[in-house]
Amino acid sequence: MTPLLFSLPKDHALFTPLCKGLPAIEGGLEFRRFPDGESYLRVCSDIEPGQPVIILADLSRPDARFLPLYFLCDTLKELGAGQVGLLAPYLCYMRQDTRFHPGEAVTSRSFAHLLSHRFDWLLTVDPHLHRYHALSDIYTIPATTVHATPLLVDWLRARSEPLLLVGPDAESEQWVSALAQASGHPFVVGSKQRRGDRDVHIRLPDLSGYHRHIAIMVDDVISSGQTLLRCARALTDAGIERIEAAAIHGLFADRIEDQLQNAGVQRLITTNSVSHPSNGLDLTPLLLEPLRQLARLADNRPPTPDNQAGADI
Ligand code: R5P
């Protein structure tokens, strides 16, 4: 049975290419807010009994987006949908993965609990796994990860200039070292101290051998943007003249693009996991096959061990 694909919000950059590529039927949705802020939601598509449904959700700025997503999933099931899967290219609430201070909420765990009780499966791109080994540490539904690394590797390999990949902090080492190995460019990793949400300090190792290189800062998430901003300033202080930045998920919570440019960042590239003018890396080709498997387009067999919880694709 052809799956239905819904998008929240309606204009996610991946919606049309995924509908065409799978193929899936575009799900119609009416959504608005009542004057008091409550959500109104109506499914405008006919749903065949047992029809598989995929919801593509932008989970940047998640608090306002989560309830409509929850309501949509419930409504689809009430209307007769079969499995309802969540495609969240950016998976939010992954960074609070421990109780850093007494009494703090470990929101990654609570959020995983909420999604696992509502959806039948989850597909995401490079979730921030630092203290967790895999999504199956906290998600109890089949949760599949796609890696955006091949897109970044192709982008880096297409460059003929001498490049230096720069991971701003220890948490970025996993991305930057894999990229360096696959693309053949050298890399360094800085050390970061975050004293507050926007109070970030970065120290870089000795860069005296790299003054002729283009430094490409690589990170998984740009949230406030302070990590990249401070890293760019540290690169400039170290005498690096050409700086670029590449990230998988560009949330740009603080609209920091101009400040990055003023700090010497000449180019910024992100995937289209979250829609933004810097989207230069298209995730569509990486998502199609796992989505087909998860929505069981090919056949109706139960999920294979390969796409069980925590599997990597
Ligand atoms: C954390 O370690 C992540 O890998 C990113 O470096 C971090 O989330 C970026 O946050 P921000 O843009 O707010 O500095």
Image (cartoon, rainbow, N blue to C red):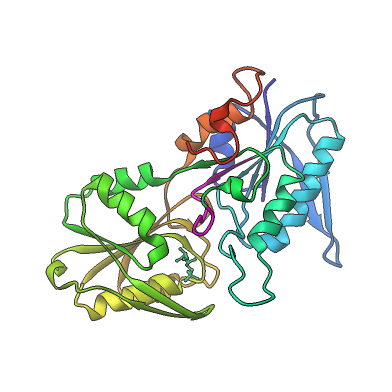
Q: Is residue 133 above or below residue 51?
A: below
- Residue 166 placement: quadrant: bottom left
Q: Is residue 34 left or right of residue 306?
A: right
| x then y, percent, for residue 76 | 80, 37
Q: Nearer the viewer, residue 94 or 57?
A: 94
| x then y, percent, for residue 26 | 67, 34
Q: Is residue 48 above or below residue 18?
A: above
Q: Nearer the viewer, residue 163 or 265?
A: 163
- Residue 124 placement: quadrant: top right
Number of dots carrying numbers: 0
Quadrant including the N terminus:
top right
| x then y, percent, for residue 263 | 33, 77
Q: Residue at x 58, y 73 (%)?
A: 100
Q: Is residue 231 left or right of residue 157?
A: right
Q: Residue at x 43, y 57 (%)?
A: 278
For the record, the magenta segment spans 122-132
| x then y, percent, for residue 297 | 62, 22
Residue 20 seen by the camera? no
Q: Is residue 170 above or below residue 13?
A: below
Q: Is residue 257 left or right of residue 177?
A: right
Residue 70 seen by the camera? yes
Q: Residue at x 49, y 49 (%)?
A: 126
Let me know if residue 209 is in the magenta part.
Answer: no
Q: Is residue 267 left or right of residue 124?
A: left
- Residue 270 placement: quadrant: bottom left
- Magenta stretch: helix, strand or loop mostly: loop
Q: Residue at x 74, y 38 (%)?
A: 28
